[in-house]
Amino acid sequence: MYRWLVRGLAAVTLLFSSWSALRIADLAIFDLAAPLTLGAALLCRRTDTSAAVPGSLKLPLIGVGLLLLGGYVALITCSDTEEHIQKVTVLVLAFTAMATLGWVFADRGIFSVTEILSLLCLSGSIGSGIAILQGRLGMFVGLMPAKVEAWGRMSGLTQHPLEAGSVAAFSAVIALGLVIYKKGWMRLFIVLAALNVYSMEYSASLTAVFAFCAAVVAIAIFFRAWLFLGVMATLTITLGGGLAATSSLPGPLASRLETILQLGGNYTTVQIRERQLRQTIGQVDGSTIFLGNGYNMAKLPDGKEIHNGFLAALFHFGILGLASQCVFIWYFLRGLLSNASRELRGILVGCAVVFLLEYSTGPALARRTVWVPMFLIAAYIGSATSTRSRVPVGQTAAPFAPVEPYA
């Protein structure tokens, strides 16, 4: 009975993981629920069918330690100690919570890998559905920040259209992966994939669109589905040519795609990001590399969060901060070397492509909606190599099979 109560609490927590617009006292509900869920899950007994082993948490904790040390060293150069300490504290707690939550779910067998993927997909799909209702029917617009509403782009249950786009891209990739992995639920996941792709018309995130397309290509190459890859390439070229030739397609995404095809590097968004990246690189010197600059919002290049996770970590926390990000990313990617099924590793490939593109082109350093899917998927798929250690003596270790729901 207790396990089922924990499963219910954990499911609600995961659903809120991509709904950053729903907040209490300026704190996301996910951030408030995660510690409670973590504590409750730790009280569950480990089962013989649990997916992970305790050692699988070491790598993300090394990343957290490097980030904390980089933040401490950056105190030497930071100009606003209070803001810097607050930022480092938030990042350290967030990364620790996300990594530990995924590990505990796997270690205690709270969910199967299918359930984790389904909950992540459902969470993003609900947010995408809200974005569509905002764009088509004008419903739930009160959930959008005032500055976003003025842009004519929809943020769904997130705080920004870019964030809504990344959530939709992750959910669409997971849904497509589940179409292959859980053939019995193929129709449902095809519908969810289509819903998330369609919502990108209203969030109008070019990064999300390109990330999703790149993820589909990566999955096709991973599965050696050359015919599928050729069809996707043909559709992409046809769509691009059609947008370049006509302005008759409605909607914010079509308008932005048409504009960037016409203007190329002169597109305002592209110019702004290029200018900020040049300014950031220009301020990176020897002191920045070894000590970092600390965190001070007033002194950020172009006055905005740095739209590149690697540069942001280096700029704020020096080489130690950059190393912490590399450790996290390796933690995500090591699942490709596991003995998980090819279908699950295909989902990891697609999500990794979305993550890396979103991480490299947006202010993703502290955005939970980008990190949560990767930490959870890595905790399950990345730990597949360890399952054999729990096979009782005298029995033969079977190939990795995801844990299914408990009776």
Image (tube, rainbow, N blue to C red):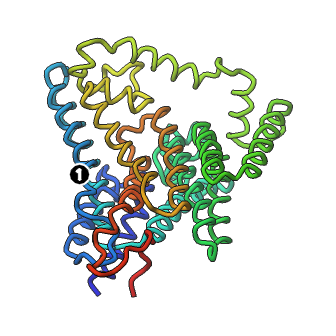
As drawn, which residue projects farthest toward the front?
394
Q: Quadrant of residue 217?
A: top right
Residue assigned mark 1: 58
Question: Residue 351's x, y, as percent?
Answer: 51, 50
Q: Quadrant of the N terminus?
A: bottom left
Question: In the rendered picture of this protein, how many numbered marks are placed on residues?
Answer: 1
Secondary structure at numbered mark 1? helix
391 is higher (above) or lower (below) than 287: below
Q: Quadrant of the C terminus?
A: bottom left
The amino acid beneath tag 1 is Lys
Q: Give the image location of residue 167, x and y in percent.
A: 51, 51
Q: How many residues crowd mark 1 within 10 Å: few (<14), some (14–19), many (20+)?
A: few
In the shown orientation, is residue 117 left or right of residue 202? left
How far from the left and from the top, in percent, is residue 26? 31, 49
Front residue of this view, candidates 281 and 90: 281
Q: Is residue 134 above or below residue 152?
A: below
**Residue 152 appears in view:** no
Q: Is residue 296 above or below residue 168?
A: above
Q: Is residue 354 visible?
A: yes
Residue 75: image location, x then y, percent: 15, 25
